[in-house]
Image (tube, helix red, strand yellow):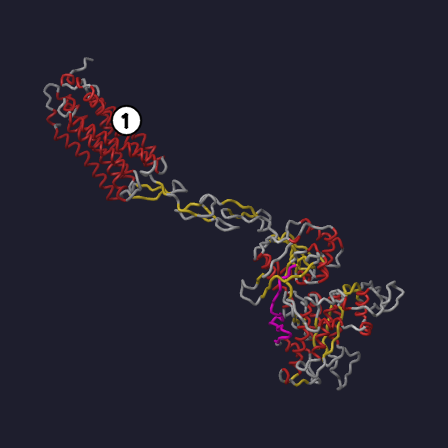
Amino acid sequence: MDGDYVIGGVFAIHEYKNTEKHNYTSMPELQRCTGSIDHRQLRFSQAMIFAIKEINNSTELLSGIKLGYQIHDSCASVLMAANAAFQLSNGLDPVFDTGDNCSQSGMVMAIVGDSSSTRSISMSRVIGSFNIPQVSHFATCACLSDKKQYPSFFRTIPSDQFQADALAKLVKHFGWTWIGAIRSDSDYGNNGMASFLEAAQKEGICVEYSESFFRTHPRSRIQRVADVIRRSTATVIVAFVASKDMRILLEELSLEPSPPRQWVASESWLTDPDMVKFTFCAGTIGFAIEQSVIPGLRDFLLDLSPSEVAASPVLTEFWEDSFNCRLEKSAATDDSLCDRNEDIQTLQSPYTDTSQLRITNMIYKAVYAIAHAIHNAVCQGRNSTAQCDKFTRIESKQVLTQLKKVNFSQNGYDVSFDANGDPVAKYELVNWQKTESGSIELVTVGHYDASLPVGQEFRINRNLTWIEGGTEVPVSVCSDSCPPGTRKVLQKGKPICCYDCVPCPEGEISNATDSPDCFPCPKEFWPNAERDTCFPKPVEFLSFDEVLGIILAAFSVGGACLAIITAAVFFHHRSSPIVRANNSELSFLLLFSLTLCFLCSLTFIGAPSEWSCMLRHTAFGITFVLCISCVLGKTIVVLMAFKATLPASNVMKWFGPLQQRMTVGCFTCIQVLICTIWLVVSPPFPMKNLTTYKERIILECALGSDIGFWAALGYIGLLAVFCLVLAVLARKLPDNFNEAKLITFSMLIFCAVWITFIPAYVSSPGKFTVAVEIFAILASSFGLTFCIFAPKCFIILFQPEKNTKKHLMNKNQS
C-alpha cells in the first residue's frame, strides 16, 4: 500500500524456499516460497497492517499523513530475508528520476521484522549501512544488542540475555542442578544457549549434554538428538529452540516416546499455538512475553471479503488451506471449488486466535514506535496541536535518531529503548496444563521483571503442574544432596554436580546441606553423633560422685580411722612392754603421719583448683617423708639398741629421744624446703587437658615444675631405700620380737608400690592418673600400717601372755 512514508515488513509466512540447482547456462528463476503457510506469521503481518491503518485514522499521531507499507515473505530463509532487505533498501519506484521533481512517495523509512535472530542479523548487516532503522518483534539474540555491529537495530521484545538469566534463576529455584540442553543450530539458539549456560554455571547448574540441530538437517541428525534425550539421566531439558525446529524434534520424539521429561522452553516455542498438540509435553514451563489486548484486531483479522482474498496470493493460499477448497478450478488438484460461503468466524486456527496476544503486541508496538519517530521528525509541536507536513523531506537516518528517543504509552503498554535498542525486560511465567478434555492450556503462573531489585525479579502466584500431570516438583540431580554431617567429594571426570557424600572426619562438622567442606569444632567443643553440631566437651575428673572416687575416698577415710584406732590401742596400752619396747614416741608420730598420708589422698579427689593442686602434691610429699623418717628413726633405734648391748658401748646416749626427734625433723625439713622452692618457682596449677582425649576435657593438676615433682618423689624414694637397707641389716638381730623384720617387709612393700607406680602413672590416661597416684599412697600407707603395727596389736589384744618383758628379752638360740 502506498503512502507518504512507507514502512517495510518482513515475516516468515512460508516455511521454506524452493531449492534449484543452477546450470549456469540460463537465467535462474526468481526465488519462490514453498511449504505450508504459517497462520501465526500471517497474523503478524496482518497486525502490522492493522496498526498502520489505525495510525492513518488517528487525529493525534501523524495527522494528515498517510503511512504505507510493503510486506515481504522471508520464507524462514536467510537468503530470502537478505533479498527482502535489499529490495526495501533500493526504494520502491521502478524508474529513477534524476530531475528536480523527485517525489518522496514510497520512501522506506524503517522495517519491521524479522521473526528470527539469524534472519534479522542478515537484514541488519544490509540495511545498517544505509541507516535504515529495523525494529524486530521476535529477534531475541543477545548479539543484536551490539551497536557497533548492528547500529540501526531495535526490538520490542527483550534480549535473550534477560531470558537466559531468568531461565537460569527458574531452574535454580526448583532445585534442578542436572539438566539437558538442546538448541537450534542458529544465531538464536547458539547465542541464547551460550548466555543460558553462562548464567547456569554461576547458579551451580550442570549440563549433562548440549545438542544442536536445525530443521533442514538430515533426519539422522534429528534422530541422534532424540536418542540422546531418551538415554539421558537428566529429567529436565532446557530448549532454546525455534518453534519450527522444535516441532520437527517433537514429531521425532512422538514416534518412540522417551521417559517423562520436564521441558523448560524458550519464548520462541512456548506460546506457539501449533506446539500445544504435543500433549506429552504437558507441564512445560518457561518465560513468555506478557499477554495483551489489542482492541479491534480480531474484527480486522476476520473481516476478509472474497474480493480482498482473491486479490492477494497469500490470502488466497490461506483461504484455500484453511477451508480445503480452491478459489479457482485447477487441473492440478482434485480439491472442490470454494462456494464463497465459507465462514471465517468459525475457523479455529492460529490466525484467528487472539486469546493470548503476545508477539502480536510486539509488532503493534514496533509500528507505533516507528510512527512516533516519523512524527517527531516531520511534525512541529506535540500531540493534538502538532502540525505535520507530508511534503517534508526526511531521510531514514532522521527516523533512526528519533527512534532512539521515543518514549510513549500505547494501549496501556510503555514503549522505549535503552542504549542498546532493547526494551525493559518483562516476562510471564507460563505453564502448559492439561484441561479435563486432554488438551493443553497455556496458564500464566508467575511474572519476571528485570527492572526490579536483585532477588525480587521473580515471583510465582499460582500452582504449577508438571510432567504427567504431577503436582510434585520433579527431581533432576546428578547426585542427591549431601545432608549435614557430610561433605561433597567430586566424582573423578564428572561435572561438579556429580559427587559422593563423605562423612566429616573426627572432630569436624558441617551444618549445611551440600557443604563442600567440614570445619573443626572449637578446641573445647566436640561434634555430636550426626556431626552437624558442636557441643561443649564433657569435663572429666575424679569426683566424689562416681564409684571409683567413692571407693578410694572410703579406703582413705578407713585407713585414717585404722591408724587412729591403732594409736588409741597403743595409747591405752602405753605402759605395756611391747609398746614401750618399740619406741612409743616414734610409733605415735608414725601413726600420726600415716593418718595424714591416708587423708592427703582425699585432696586428689574432686575438681582441681589452684589451692588443691598445690596442697595435694606438697601434702603428699611432706607427710610421706615424715612417715619414712619415723620408720627410719625406728630402724636406727633398733640398730643402736643392739649395739648398746655390747660391752663398753655407750652409743644410745648419742641417739636418745632428742636425737630421734631431731632426725625426723631434719629429714622432714629437707622435704619442706624442696616443696617450698617448688611452690615458689613453678607451683602446680589446674589445667584442662585437651590432648589425651579428643572428645572430652580432663581437668587435672599440671605439675608446674617436673623437676620439683620428681625431686620430692625422689627424696621419698631415697629415704625409703636407705631405710630398707638398714632394716635388712637389722633383720636377724637376736631379739625374740625384732621390729626390724616388720620394717623390712613394710619397706619392701613401699618400694615395690612406688616402683610400680612410676610406669603406671606415666601411662595412665586422664582421671586414672590421679587414681593410680591415690592407689599408690593408700597401698604404701596400708603396707606400713599392717606390717609394722598389726603384729603388735594382735599380741596386745589377743596374746597378752606374750606382752611381757621376759618374753621380749628372750634370745633366739640359733
Q: Is residue 586 above or below residue 255?
A: above
At 46% across and 49% down in the image, what residue appears? 519
Q: Is residue 269 above or below residue 67?
A: above
In which quadrant is the C terminus drawn? top left
At 14% across and 33% down in the image, what residue appears? 662
Disc 1 residue crowd, few under 14, some 14–19, many 20+, Cα 10 Å: some
Residue stretch in magenta: 407-431
Decide if residue 31 is in sight here. no
User: In the image, is residue 152 part of the stretch drawn in magenta?
Assistant: no
Residue 312 image position (x, y, % from top left): 80, 72
In which quadrant is the N terminus drawn? bottom right
Q: 746 or 4, which lies in front? A: 4
Quarter of the rendering containing residue 119: bottom right
User: In the image, is residue 422 part of the stretch drawn in magenta?
Assistant: yes
Residue 204 image position (x, y, % from top left): 57, 55
Q: Is residue 788 left or right of residue 47?
A: left
Residue 485 image position (x, y, % from top left): 49, 46
Q: Which residue is mark 1?
A: 749
